[in-house]
Image (spheres, grey):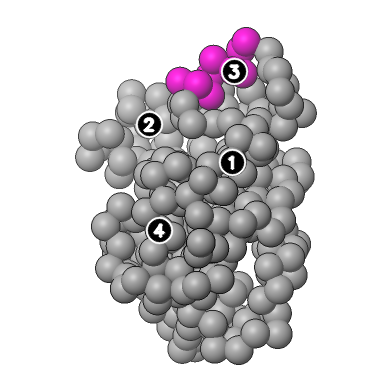
Amino acid sequence: MDEKYLKLLIDLHIDGKRQGPGGVQETLKMIELAGLRHQKNLKIADIGCGTGIASIFLAKELSARITSIDFLPEFIDVLKQTVKSEYLTNIDAKVCSMDNLPFDDEEYDVLWSEGAIYNIGFEKGVKEWRRFLKKNGLLILSEITWLTEERPDEIQNHWDSEYPEIDTASEKIKILEKAGYSPVAYFYLPESCWTDNYYNPMQSRFTEFLERNRNSTTAQEIIEAEKVEIDLYGRFKEYLSYGVYIARRVDR
């Protein structure tokens, strides 16, 4: 991805509360299923945090110190501004690539990553990140997932091109087990996490985004690509979503 294209993507998404599908109730469900509510002094790394909606929620809801990581300085700057304005003292936000994390072995109780592990790849990510978890620590993440064994060619071909590692939950769980985790819980995000919380707010920014960028060819290409994805989701939403995976590190 060239620098110009990346800057435009940042411009489109930086003002959104979310940079991908998700929801407050779903984050709460993740917390409850993982049994984090009553634990004290947790160390949590939020990997690929974007502008930090999950980090902020975790910092307010849990007894935890949050390390928030994203490779985009612009997103981390937004998170730092929020941390300052809300007087949060338990978030440490850092600019860093998820394939070169500055963590010590067995440093964290929880590794959290919503809709971001695709940047490194699911299989590579769960294998490489495992060493940063304490023994019996938890990996909690969301990942684009097929909801059925068979799909229409149109949606299959689109996502095979966009992200070849897309697969069913059963296959993702096999990868987790082979990488040294024991599955704890799984669920998938409902339609509202895509439409109400992500696509609709993003669409409301399209016009100003194009005007701000003088309707450049690249800006128009980005909007058209988003429209294609939104249309495909609308027509094929029964076949895919983000799956939420909660798994515990096991040591044989």
Mark 2 in CB contact with mark 1 (< 8 angstroms): no
Which quarter of the picture shows residue 107? bottom left
The residue that mark 4 highlights is 129
Q: Nearer the viewer, mark 4 or mark 1?
A: 1
Q: Main secondary structure of the magenta part?
A: helix
Q: CA distance from mark 2 to mark 1?
A: 39 Å
- Quadrant of the rendering where the N terminus is positioned: top left
SS class, disc 2? helix
Mark 4, Cα crowd under 10 Å, few <14 / some 14-19 / many 20+, is some
Residue 28 visible, this orientation: no
Q: Amino acid at mark 2?
A: Ala
Instruction: Give the residue drawn at x 62%, y 10%.
Output: 153
Say which label, 2 or 4, has the lower sequence index: 4
- Residue situated furthest top in the rendering: 153
For the residue pair 173 and 53, the one nearer the viewer reads as: 173
Mark 2 in CB contact with mark 3 (< 8 angstroms): no
SS class, disc 4? helix
The residues colored magenta run: 153-161
Q: Amino acid at mark 1?
A: Lys
Confirm whether the magenta stretch covers residue 151. no
Q: CA distance from mark 3 to mark 1?
A: 21 Å
Q: Nearer the viewer, mark 2 or mark 3?
A: 3
For the residue pair 131 and 240, the one nearer the viewer reads as: 131
Residue 127 visible, this orientation: yes
Say which label, 4 or 3, has the lower sequence index: 4
Q: Position of residue 59 (x, y in %)?
A: 56, 79
Instruction: Give the residue drawn at x 64%, y 32%.
Output: 168
